[in-house]
Amino acid sequence: MKRTLISCLLILFSLSAFAQNNPGFGIKAGLNFNSNGDYKFDQAPNLSADSKIGYHLGVFATFGDDIYLRPELIFTKTKSDYSGDDFDMSKLDLPVLLGFKVIGPLSVFAGPDFQYILNTDFDGVTLGDVENDFTVGLHLGAAVNLGNLGVDLRYERGLSSNEANFVGLSDRRLDTRPSQFILSLWVKL
């Protein structure tokens, strides 16, 4: 899986040699308003997650002008609350976004998000490994470009089913798919 992620990165960033319109590279950071999936019990009702604030930081490249391709590499830290117990997850995201300018500085974008889960932690309980370290999600959003500065708001939803089991508690599972709003500030270098 790591080899696949690295290969995807090399291919996407090598596209810069073919970009002909206003390419740009930059850094970004911001806040995530996250809730993961349900905390599932075999013999009891499921618990839904309450949103908590996380953060992200990363790099991006933009190729094109009115219609553009924007691959990003982002470290993301999310947190969800299940009746007072926190679930933390750290992951690397590789969204590959296709966007177009709508009017003036406003653009919209969408694309797949390839996710590699680095670490998961649940308060007071030992989690087993998640089913898949490598998952796929979807990003949809809008951005305002103010020259070399910009802000975007997007929604991310994990598409791949991915659960973690609890060590010693075979009747419980945790859906680790993210469902979050992401607010980012970015600077083109």
Image (cartoon, helix red, strand yellow):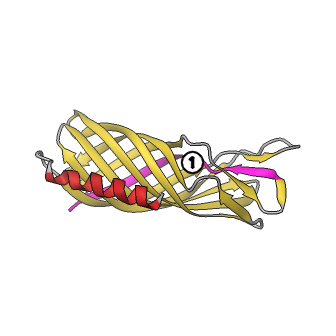
Image location of residue 25, percent across then percent down: 23, 58
Question: Is residue 155 among what the camera can see?
Answer: yes
Q: What residue appears at the point 80 percent right and 51 percent down from the top-left corner?
A: 172
Please rate how many residues cluster around mark 1, counting C-alpha atoms within 10 Å: few if below 14, some from 14 to 19, many from 20. many
Q: Nearer the viewer, residue 155 or 150?
A: 155
Q: Place residue 161 in its image quadrant.
A: top right
Which residue is most to the right? 43
Q: Nearer the viewer, residue 92 or 146?
A: 92
Q: What residue appears at the point 63 percent right and 51 percent down from the top-left corner?
A: 176
Residue hosting label 1:
178
What secondary structure prevails in the magenta region? strand
Q: Secondary structure at mark 1?
A: loop
Magenta stretch containing residue 183, yes or no?
Answer: yes
Q: Which residues are magenta?
A: 171-189
Q: 26 left or right of 64?
A: right
Image location of residue 47, percent across then percent down: 76, 46
Q: What residue appears at the point 34 percent right and 38 percent down from the top-left corner?
A: 109
Q: What residue appears at the point 44 percent right and 55 percent down from the top-left corner?
A: 93
